[in-house]
């Protein structure tokens, strides 16, 4: 059964950690060399713009229901159906009962 996506330390999502590291690297580059920092900032800006476009067009910001969450709910429903079928049949068959 699919598991829910894990978070780092329970409250911090991985994407925010990556973003914070990128901003720290940008600040270090900007402090070290202004032209290199501006180039890194431009690159980070382009990456952010592409991520926003994809998130709005296809991802969680589009308002459409998540395909993954629908799959997880379907797997949970199948598991519930299997458990109820086992309960209705009187439990799993003993190994000696099988042919």
Image (cartoon, grey):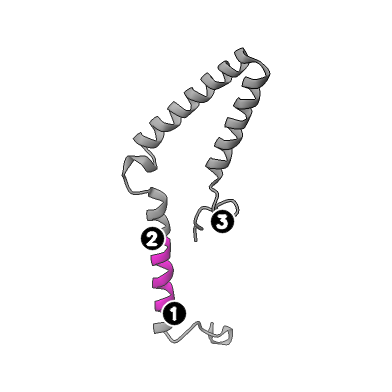
- Please name the residue shown 44% across and 76% down the image: 83
| Mark 3–mark 1 distance (CA, rounded to whole Å) | 35 Å
Residue, far left: 63
- Please name the residue shown 66% across and 15% down the image: 33
Residue 74 got which mark? 2
- Please name the residue shown 40% across and 54% down the image: 69
Element at label 1: helix
Principal secondary structure, stretch drawn in magenta: helix
Q: Is residue 42 above or below residue 63?
A: above
- Please name the residue shown 58% across and 83% down the image: 95
* Residue 77 is inside the magenta segment: yes
**Residue range corresponding to the magenta coloring:** 74-85
Q: Position of residue 64 (x, y in %)?
A: 31, 45
* Residue 54 is inside the magenta segment: no
Which residue is at the front of the view, 82 or 4?
4
The residue pinned by badge 1 equals: 86
| Mark 2–mark 3 distance (CA, rounded to whole Å) | 25 Å
Say which of marks 2 and 3 sits in front: 3
**Residue contact between numbered discs 2 and 1, judged by CB atoms under 8 Å:** no
Mark toward the start of the polypeptide (2 vs 3): 3
Q: Position of residue 4 (x, y in %)?
A: 49, 56
Q: Position of residue 2 (x, y in %)?
A: 49, 57
Residue, far right: 32
Which residue is at the front of the view, 44 or 1?
44
Which residue is at the front of the view, 58 or 48?
48
Mark toward the start of the polypeptide (2 vs 1): 2
Q: Residues within 10 Å of mark 3 (few under 14, many from 20)?
A: few
Q: Residues within 10 Å of mark 2 (few under 14, many from 20)?
A: some
The residue pinned by badge 3 equals: 10
On the image, which quarter does residue 27 sit in?
top right
């Amino acid at each position: 059964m699919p598991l829910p996506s894990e978070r780092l330390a329970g409250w911090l999502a991985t994407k925010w950690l990556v973003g914070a590291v990128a901003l720290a690297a940008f600040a270090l580059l900007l402090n070290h060399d202004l032209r290199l920092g501006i180039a890194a900032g431009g690159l980070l800006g382009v990456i952010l713009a592409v991520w926003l476009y994809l998130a709005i067009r296809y991802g969680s910001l589009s308002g459409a229901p998540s395909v993954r969450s629908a799959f997880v709910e379907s797997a949970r429903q199948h598991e519930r159906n299997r458990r109820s079928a086992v309960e209705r049949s009187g439990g799993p068959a003993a190994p000696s009962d099988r042919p």
